[in-house]
Image (cartoon, rainbow, N blue to C red):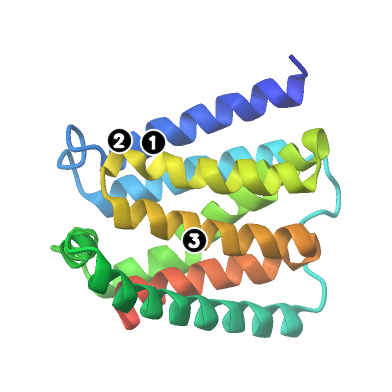
């Protein structure tokens, strides 16, 4: 196996293990969720940075104002998609609202200010740099950009399977597909995707819950 492929597989196994630790019914109650999420994000970020350190200039931010504006627009549009999806899902899936509420239940006992800071400055950026900046980029180099979009989107959704929460898995699938498609079309928008992921997380979980 090619060295970069074996490293990618190892990184994905680490991500799967971390998501099991955070979301599985056997481990989700062991410790504060946001502490575990932050530690997991830090691990993913360190993996992404270390694996991408040889690709000079890939993460260089160009045209910061445009990236910032694009990131905000993506976050707002994605929030609107989820708002509409929530209303539609409740009309056809009787379990939808209870599963969404269970996701929001993880906020209990933790300051909303702390959660928003973690989402904006650590968790959102770490996830985007790992899944798009490292995983999708690496798969694209090996299998091509179209295969990379499919593989990364499905893997991002599947690591959430440990929650046994259909709505959470579908949310990861939809959001991952949106960010992945944008990255597939224009990889230079990675900084905008980082911004959008961070803002969308904070909007959905803290500022404008759905």
In the orientation shown, which residue stands out farthest toward the top? 1
**Tags 1 and 2 touching, CB below 8 Å:** yes
The residue pinned by badge 1 equals 18
Q: Nearer the viewer, mark 3 or mark 2?
A: 3
Distance between the alpha carbons at the discs numbered 1 and 2: 5 Å
Identify which residue, 28 or 156, lies in the foreground.
156
Distance between the alpha carbons at the discs numbered 1 and 3: 21 Å
- Say above or below: 1 vs 65: above
Q: Position of residue 48 (x, y in %)?
A: 63, 43
For disc 2, the neighbor class at 10 Å (few under 14, some 14 to 19, many from 20) is many
For disc 1, the neighbor class at 10 Å (few under 14, some 14 to 19, many from 20) is many
- Say above or below: 18 vs 201: above
Sequence-wise, which precedes: disc 3 or disc 2? 2
Is disc 1 placed on a helix, strand or loop?
Answer: helix
The residue pinned by badge 3 equals 174
Residue 21 shows which numbered tag?
2
Left or right: residue 2 compared with residue 91: right
In the orientation shown, which residue stands out farthest toward the right? 56
- Say above or below: 30 vs 170: above
Identify which residue, 197 or 82, lies in the foreground.
82
Q: Position of residue 190 (x, y in %)?
A: 70, 63
Q: Residue at x 26, y 43 (%)?
A: 164
């Amino acid at each position: 196996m090619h060295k970069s492929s074996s490293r990618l597989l190892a990184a994905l196994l680490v991500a799967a293990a971390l998501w099991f630790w955070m979301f599985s019914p056997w481990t989700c109650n062991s410790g504060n969720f946001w502490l575990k999420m932050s530690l997991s994000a830090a691990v993913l970020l360190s993996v992404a940075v270390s694996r991408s350190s040889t690709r000079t200039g890939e993460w260089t931010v160009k045209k910061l104002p445009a990236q910032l504006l694009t990131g905000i627009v993506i976050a707002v549009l994605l929030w609107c998609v989820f708002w509409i999806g929530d209303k539609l899902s409740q009309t056809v899936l009787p379990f939808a609202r209870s599963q969404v509420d269970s996701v929001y239940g993880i906020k209990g006992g933790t300051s909303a200010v702390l959660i928003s800071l973690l989402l904006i400055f650590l968790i959102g950026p770490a996830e985007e740099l790992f899944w798009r900046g490292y995983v999708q980029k690496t798969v694209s180099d090996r299998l091509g950009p179209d295969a990379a979009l499919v593989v990364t989107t499905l893997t991002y959704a599947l690591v959430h399977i440990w929650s046994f929460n259909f709505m959470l898995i579908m949310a990861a699938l939809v959001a991952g597909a949106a960010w992945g498609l944008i990255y597939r079309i224009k990889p230079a928008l990675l900084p905008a995707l980082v911004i959008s992921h961070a803002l969308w997380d904070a909007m959905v979980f803290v500022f404008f819950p759905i």
